[in-house]
């Protein structure tokens, strides 16, 4: 019976962890920043459904797995420790404590100090003094939102810089059409081929992917 109870507890915990996988993929990995940047670039090109969302998220997922590979290797090494039994709740708490260390290191490296400081200060007013005791800048409740906010901020910074060349093409095409008196012609229809040509000429997808990956070095 004790062995059966241990197996049931392990199964319940594994199912719960699988349910949290989508949240983990968005909150503590590079998925959010990569997907936002790719969507902004697609909108800047003016091709609203090409590539489709499934392709965008597929690229973001593949790059996220690539970037998280060293972290996954560290977690695999920790899980392979023969001292871990995965039988009782205390065993799982120990696994979580050990596994959270490499995750914290990754989040600390990529969460902006200002965002971490804000969430540390906000815990006292949001959670109350009692719950806020012991919460520091390297605690997971602080690191996760700080990392997510930092990633979104960087994503929009990158998206803004990538948007400017395409915006310039739109303005130039609109000015030329206005000067020629072709006001009935849609500037978007004329600008899209030029934007695609520019993006292909500079090897845009490769450079964009390389820049996103190298931003985590």
Image (spheres, helix red, strand yellow):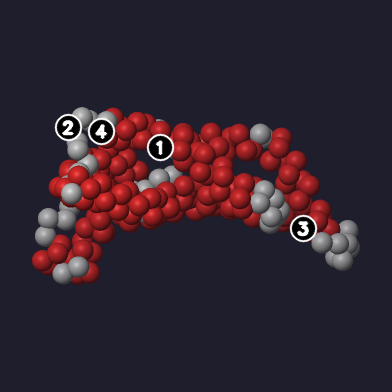
Tell me the residue at 25%/40% (across/down). 99
Q: Image quadrant for the C terminus?
A: top left
Q: Which residue in the protein does label 2 denote?
A: 83
Under tag 2, what secondary structure? Answer: loop
In this rendering, the label closer to the viewer, 3 or 4: 4
Q: Which residue in the protein does label 1 denote?
A: 68
Disc 2 crowd rating (10 Å Cα; few below 14, some 14-19, many 20+) is: few
User: What label does residue 198 carry, if any?
Assistant: none
Q: CA distance from mark 1 to mark 3?
A: 38 Å
Question: Is there any visible trace of residue 69 in the rendered image?
Answer: yes
Under tag 3, what secondary structure? Answer: helix
User: What label does residue 78 carry, if any?
Assistant: 4
Q: Earlier in the sequence, mark 1 or mark 4?
A: 1
Relative vertical location of residue 125 with respect to residue 2 in this rendering, above or below: below
> Which residue is more in the foreground, 108 or 85?
85
Q: Earlier in the sequence, mark 2 or mark 1?
A: 1
Under tag 1, what secondary structure? Answer: loop
Disc 4 crowd rating (10 Å Cα; few below 14, some 14-19, many 20+) is: some
> Which residue is more in the foreground, 72 or 201?
72
Tell me: 105 left or right of 24. Answer: left
In this rendering, the label closer to the viewer, 2 or 4: 2
Q: CA distance from mark 3 to mark 4?
A: 54 Å
Tell me the residue at 80%/56% (across/down). 189
Relative vertical location of residue 44 with respect to residue 127 in this rendering, above or below: above
Q: CA distance from mark 2 to mark 3?
A: 63 Å
In the orientation shown, which residue stands out farthest toward the front? Answer: 1
């Amino acid at each position: 019976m004790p062995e059966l109870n241990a197996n049931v507890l392990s199964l319940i915990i594994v199912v719960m962890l699988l349910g949290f996988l989508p949240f983990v993929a968005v909150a503590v990995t590079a998925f959010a920043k990569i997907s936002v940047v790719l969507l902004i670039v697609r909108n800047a090109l003016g091709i609203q459904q090409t590539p489709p969302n499934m392709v965008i998220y597929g690229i973001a997922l593949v790059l996220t797995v690539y970037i998280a590979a060293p972290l996954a290797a560290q977690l695999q090494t920790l899980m392979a420790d023969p001292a871990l039994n995965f039988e009782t709740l205390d065993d799982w708490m120990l696994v979580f404590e050990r596994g959270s260390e490499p995750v914290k290191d990754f989040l600390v490296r990529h969460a902006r100090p200002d965002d971490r400081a804000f969430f540390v200060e906000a815990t006292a007013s949001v959670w109350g003094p009692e719950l806020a005791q012991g919460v520091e800048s390297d605690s997971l409740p602080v690191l996760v939102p700080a990392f997510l906010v930092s990633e979104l901020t960087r994503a929009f910074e990158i998206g803004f810089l990538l948007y400017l060349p395409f915006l310039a093409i739109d303005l130039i095409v609109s000015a030329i059409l206005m000067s020629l008196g072709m006001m009935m012609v849609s500037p978007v229809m004329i600008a899209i081929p030029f934007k695609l040509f520019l993006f292909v000429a500079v090897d845009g997808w490769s450079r964009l992917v390389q820049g996103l990956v190298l931003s985590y070095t």
